[in-house]
Image (cartoon, helix red, strand yellow):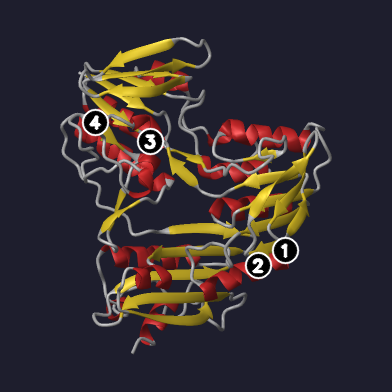
Amino acid sequence: MKFVIIGGDAAGMSAAMQIVRNSSGNSIIVLEKGGIYSYGQCGLPYVVGGKIESTDKVIARTQEEFQQKYGIDARVFHEVKSIDIKNKVVSGIIHNTGEGFDESYDRLLVATGASPIVPKWEGVSLPGIFTLKTIPDTEEILDFLYKGVRDVQSVVVIGGGYIGLEMAENFAELGKDVTIVERNEQLAGIFDNEMSELIHQEAKKHNVKLRMGESVEGFIGNQFVEYIKTDKGEIKADIVLVATGIRPNTSFLDGTGIVLGVNNAIRVNAYMQTNIEDVYAAGDCATQYHRVKERDDHIPLGTHANKQGRIAGLNMVNIPATFKGVVGTSIIKFFDLSLGRTGLSEKEASALNFPTATVFIESKDIAGYYPNDKKLTVKLVYHKETQKLLGGQVIGENGVDKRIDVLSTALYHSMTVDELLDLDLAYAPPYNGVWDPIQQAARRVK
């Protein structure tokens, strides 16, 4: 059987490896638009900040390793432009030669990921304006910072989501003068207002300037970007990072009949199948079933991409496996704080018409009498009538990941807030109080 995979990163190569490990005598062709395989995109902000010494460190496996060790026909600079569903052929262009190509398939996986959204602002093509999604993006930023193109002091980050916050932190720790411009009134919109206020305080504590409720209109400059023009004035900028979200790479599917869903991501079932026979999809270009919302969603994260790719690969070689869905778990480091959330925020739950109630507490990450305890802020969102847990948010210096993972597991199993009290969680004074902070919060539910 001949398998063709479009996309050589997390989802695509997870699928390819499952095909290799669980079948034999097949042809596996991977068509990657760029020149690099299997790298950790989430590590790129820390390469810019110098915490990770080079982009080489975030590459899991090289093209040569896939070819020589696993027998995968892993190609680079092959961009698929169209799919002939009837005749089972993908067509595209080889960027480093300019030639076209056609490749037939028996089964096809679309794992094309997503690309940064860059609005069509005036002057957006000026040198010094960047996005961050790939290793070449990272190298371009590093060259601009360190190869004497200009003296970079003032940095403007457009967008206060996860990438925006991570990049603001890393630029600030390089000693740059950092400003975040966010069109909404809060950073990290997936958190509720009282939790995001902690994020605002942390930004100001580290001298990151916040321009909230401000919309970018364009850029001003000659040889390089010099100022950002907004609806409230101008902001000096030696370098600009645009972090306004990402969009699934699915536009090339127009006319194929492949059904798209949330955010124009490819709609897939639990087996990673599309509505077209023998065509699968996985990763940032595909939908994910949200267990709490009980509907398809689009939450592009590396964890989901690897899981979906693995499941797609198994099903492509007739080993039944299903993707069990997501609950919306994520965590980010922002200076001294960890920001964790899972499930639904109060805003999301209300928008979905859940009868919603919440509890909000300030606690400690360890026993209050043990040295060096740190504040931990916890918010639980639950169903007012059934007391079923709907979501949780935890922010603090230490112990956030532990609590978010417990809440994520509770959401996966549809637990109530009362049932949180029955969990047998690890306790010793250097690690916890006798009642874990999420249990303390659950005890306040009426």
Which of the two discs, 1 and 3, sits closer to the camera?
Answer: 3
For badge 2, the amino acid type reads Glu
Would you say residue 286 is visible in this rendering?
yes
Q: Nearer the viewer, residue 405 or 434?
A: 405
Precedes in sequence: disc 1 or disc 3: 1
Q: Which mark is residue 250?
A: 3
The reply to whether callout 1 and callout 4 are in contact (CB within 8 Å) is: no
For badge 1, the amino acid type reads His
Identify which residue is drawn at 61% across, 34% down: 137
Q: Nearer the viewer, residue 128 or 26?
A: 128
The residues tagged by marks 1 and 3 sit, at their Cα atoms, a distance apart of 39 Å
The residue pinned by badge 1 equals 206
Q: Which SS class for mark 3?
A: loop
Q: Left or right? Give the position of 141 relative to 422.
A: right
Residue 32, image x, y percentages: 43, 24
The residues tagged by marks 1 and 4 sit, at their Cα atoms, a distance apart of 48 Å
The residues tagged by marks 3 and 2 sit, at their Cα atoms, a distance apart of 37 Å
Q: Which mark is residue 311?
A: none
